[in-house]
Amino acid sequence: MTTQEGLRVDLRYDYINQDQLRHGSGVASSADVANALANGSAGETEQYTKNNYYTLGLDYLINRNWGVNLQVPYMDREHGTLGASETDVTSSHTQSLGDIKLIGRYQGLFPDAKTGLMLGMKFATGKQDYTFNSGPGAGGALDASLQPGTGSTDLIIGAYHFDRLTPTVDWFAQGLYQTAMSARNDYRPGNAINLNLGMRYTGFGNIMPQLQINAQQRQSDSGNLSDPMNTGGKLAYLSPGVTIKVSDQVKVYGFVQLPVYQYVEGLQLAPRWNASFGVNFGI
């Protein structure tokens, strides 16, 4: 967030490789998988989900108090799963525009404009009709939770604050709540709460180390096309990173996101680490 009026453009790449099958707060054992398949709480054993996200962000501060942010994601996702009685992997590869977010903010609550409220929408712009393209299940419908779009129109509300601890240390806190107001195809993604806390050191001049804590609690999905027993959970990540000021208008940044706590409902794939890189510049 900023108090400087005008338009800023953000181009970001996120890499999320979900290659570890987990159950509860630990790695899923062969017994966990066997029990889930036997009691019908899982009809498959997911092998991997490799995600590449490319996001265009446009942030326009109309004046000191009012701003708007647009997020346009494009995703490239590979997924593989093993059916209950199968020995060959069924896989999919989706490449498509995702669901677009538009969020407005007001930071005129106090004279310093460092505390703000957020209100926005996620629109159902992503495709929902991808199928598996290879393996025993080729041609079958891809799971609703793996489609580029959820089909839902979501309400997003939140609040944030940023300030300076010392002359060389800045900090911020942000909370966001997202809930589906309408859904298509009998699939509704679970409500989610996201909490973020970060610090930045500016004493090195143009090189600014940063550290964030990112946490999420998400409810299970619902609807006939959902898998409520194997969706939802609580996640917390420690995210070290750095921002480099190339010029007064251009900054590049990178983060590595490391899980410090993961609790998932049922059987779910989770990443061992994530990475984000981007460039942010003013126009």
Image (cartoon, rainbow, N blue to C red):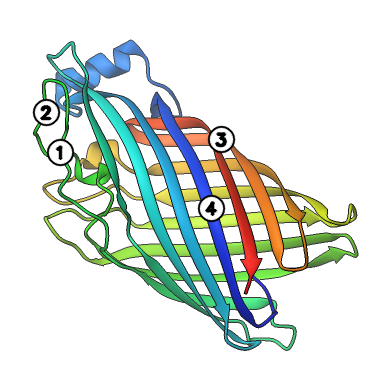
Say what secondary structure mark 2 lies in. loop
Q: Judge from the rendering whether residue 160 lies leftward or rightward of residue 38; answer left or right.
A: right
Task: Write the residue at 34% across / 50% down.
Answer: 219
Location of mark 4 (residue): 12
Residue 241: percent from the left, percent from the top?
69, 45
Q: Which mark is residue 138?
A: 2
Q: Is residue 265 above or below residue 156?
A: above
Nearest to N terminus: mark 4 or mark 3: 4
Say what secondary structure mark 1 lies in. loop
Residue 56: percent from the left, percent from the top?
47, 60
Q: Amino acid at mark 2?
A: Ala
Q: Are marks 1 and 4 in contact (CB under 8 Å)?
A: no
Label 3 Cα crowd, 10 Å radius (few <14 / some 14-19 / many 20+):
some
**Spatial CA span between label 2 and label 3:** 33 Å
Nearest to N terminus: mark 4 or mark 2: 4
Q: Amino acid at mark 3?
A: Pro
Q: Which mark is residue 259?
A: 3
Task: Write the residue at 63% across / 44% down.
Answer: 255
Q: Amino acid at mark 1?
A: Thr
Image quadrant where one finds the C terminus: bottom right
